[in-house]
Amino acid sequence: MSLGRKKRALALGALLLSALALGGCSISIADLPLVGTPSDAPSRPKEAGAYLPVNELPPDRDEAAMDPAQRAKIQKELVAARDHQASVTAAKDAAAKDSAAK
């Protein structure tokens, strides 16, 4: 390959790369004609959606998310699972130390 062809190929590659880099900033991939959207996709809204209100709190609930008895039961189950896992892990660690010491 001659020196002129190499320069031309590099220049063409740089031009293509810069066109892709600049073009990528201006459009969404979904808007590209090759990618496009499926025919059954809903159309996009004309205006972008408004931001959610930051200072507005959601309304208070009419009922509690979880009653205290159910919450206590779940906490008891989680503590039991944690303790069981800790004892299993401790037993495995002790067995590994015993086998390594021998």
Image (cartoon, rainbow, N blue to C red):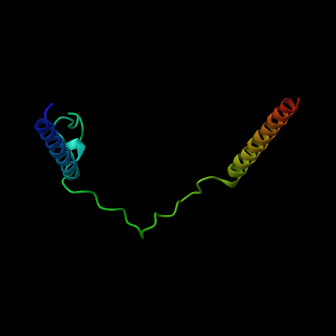
Residue 98 location, x and y as percent? Answer: 87, 32
Q: Could you tell me residue 39's position as x and y percent?
A: 20, 33
The image quadrant where one finds the N terminus is top left
Q: Residue at x 85, y 29 (%)?
A: 99
Question: Could you say which is closer to the camera, residue 43 or residue 59?
Answer: 43
Which quarter of the rendered picture does the C terminus lie within?
top right
Q: As drawn, which residue projects farthest toward the front?
A: 3
Count the marks.
0
- Does 42 sit above or below residue 59? above
- In the image, taking residue 48 as reference, residue 79 lies left or right, namely right
Residue at the (72%, 49%) spot, across then down = 75
Quadrant of the rendered structure where residue 41 is?
Answer: top left
Up the image or down, 102 lies above or below 58; here it is: above
Q: In the picture shown, does residue 82 fall above or below 95?
A: below
- Location of residue 40 (image quadrant): top left
Q: Position of residue 52 (x, y in %)?
A: 36, 62
Direction bottom: furthest residue: 55
Residue at image x 70%, y 46%? Answer: 74
Q: Residue at x 14, y 41 (%)?
A: 7
Towards the viewer: 81 or 11: 11
**Closer to the camera, 77 or 92?**
92
Q: Quadrant of residue 13?
A: top left
Location of residue 60 in the rendering, given as x and y in whole percent from the top left corner: 51, 64
